Amino acid sequence: QVQLVESGGGLVQPGGSLRLSCAASGSIYSINAMGWYRQAPGKERELVATIPSDGTSNYSDSVKGRFTISRDNAKNTVYLQMSSLKPEDTAVYYCNAQVRRRYHTPYLSYWGQGTQVTVSS
């Protein structure tokens, strides 16, 4: 099995910063794209940012210039550095990874349990 464990959420004032981490563990042969999504109360889950195993990261327009996604392939870990946070960034943030568990098998999508980020004064 594959587990994704997020950490780093919490309460922060507007304009503040937080760093989220997500570590993948278990039966992993390789990981393709990793990413962060978020879901606010009453809204659908939306893309925040993704990063391929190599190449250019992708950001939603609402976070571009404020958030930075990065990854450490040796640790199977993805990070999300969030700056200039706004109340509208309040949501549960979910980590996602496209994981191949054995050679020559398809990549499957795995999700973390989510971590709450609240931006409020």
Image (spheres, rainbow, N blue to C red):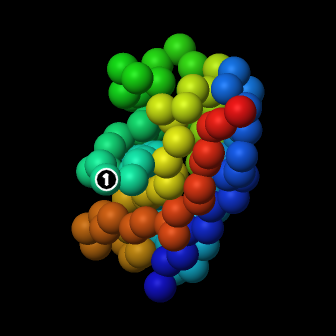
Percent of width and height locating residue 37:
42, 47
Percent of width and height locating residue 16:
73, 27
Residue positioned most to the front: 121
Q: Is residue 68 visible?
A: no
Q: Pick the quarter of the image with the C terminus.
A: top right
Q: Residues within 10 Å of mark 1 (few under 14, many from 20)?
A: few
- Asked whether 87 or 65 is in front, the reply is 87
Apparent side of residue 73 relative to residue 93 in the rendered image (left or right): right
Return the residue at label 1. 42
Q: Residue at x 51, y 70 (%)?
A: 113
Q: What is the quadrant of residue 59 in the picture?
A: top left
Q: Residue at x 50, y 54 (%)?
A: 92
Q: Residue at x 51, y 35 (%)?
A: 89
Q: What is the quadrant of residue 105 in the picture?
A: bottom left
Apparent side of residue 105 relative to residue 29 in the rendered image (left or right): left
Amino acid beneath label 1: Gly
Name the secondary structure under disc 1.
Answer: loop
- Asked whether 51 or 16 is in front, the reply is 16
Up-down: is 95 above or below 99?
A: above
Percent of width and height locating residue 43:
30, 49
Percent of width and height locating residue 20:
66, 47
Q: Residue at x 55, y 32 (%)?
A: 87
Q: Is residue 98 visible?
A: yes
